[in-house]
Amino acid sequence: MALQIGAVAPDFEADTTEGKIKFHDWLGDSWGLLFSHPKDFTPVCTTELGALARLKPEFDKRGVKLMGLSVDPVDKHAKWSEDIRETQGAAPNYPMIGDTDYNVSKLYDMLPAAVSGDPSKRTAADNQTVRNVFVIGPDKKIKLVLVYPMSTGRNFQEILRAIDSLQLTSKHNVSTPSDWKPGEDVIISGSVSDEQAKSIYPQGWKSPKPYIRIVAQPK
């Protein structure tokens, strides 16, 4: 059974490129982005890790900590990092888990429980399900899950947009419509009655249908 939105993100201890960590302690009161890769020295993942390194200031602004994962060992990550810097213009500036015992991949339902053996003997195709993105809130609960095939690089601008929505809607009883961007109008959540909405939005709202109540984005 795959991890569901709202489930507590499994805690774990792991070796990373920045030392041993206990995941929940490392997160602290921050948001977190845990993203996984099937194998080191793979082309699409190389572009993704470089893109994320360049975008790290944007995640920092939002209070989001980044954590990568591959089943290859930490020393291999370090060598891969040199290639990423050379080809992408930026090397990973966030920790990368060396999940050589598959513990984290199994905890997060990215690999079957029966997987075992030497990770160096496994191909990227063997690990193709290790291509996930988990956004985790300060309450340690999973807020978003994305799963990509190996042939499709992840769009981190979309992930930033989704985080902007998650952070806004965690503070206010609103939802964001399709293709929403920060600063655009939002929708009053269905859990808010019209009476409650009148006290929150005394200026009123646009309502093309009774179940659609549109207001300016709360500050």
Image (cartoon, rainbow, N blue to C red):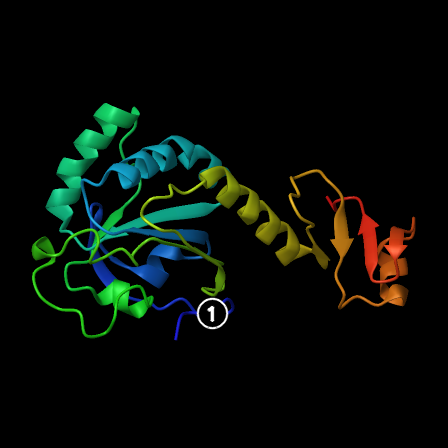
Task: Please report the residue visible at 47 percent of the width from the left and 69 percent of the height from the top.
Answer: 4
Please tell me which residue is depicted at 19% across the width and 55% down the height of the picture.
Answer: 71
> Which residue is tagged 1?
4
Rendered position, 80 above or below 168: above
Total marks drawn?
A: 1
The residue at 38%/30% (across/down) is: 54
Q: Is residue 94 above or below residue 121?
A: above
Q: Residue at x 91, y 53 (%)?
A: 202
Could you say where residue 176 lies in the image, as x and y percent from the top left?
68, 51
**Direction from residue 131 to residue 58 in the image, left or right:** right
| Res 44 seen here | yes
Quarter-of-image position of residue 155: top left
Which quarter of the figure has residue 57? top left
In the figure, residue 88 lies in which quadrant?
top left
Element at label 1: loop
Residue 107 location in percent, x, y? 30, 69
Quadrant in which the C terminus appears = top right
Residue 2: x, y in percent? 40, 70
Q: Quadrant of the N terminus?
A: bottom left
Q: Position of residue 46 (x, y in %)?
A: 27, 36
Q: Nearer the viewer, residue 160 or 87?
A: 87
Tell me if residue 62 can be seen: no
Q: Amino acid at mark 1?
A: Gln
Q: Is residue 124 left or right of residue 3?
A: left
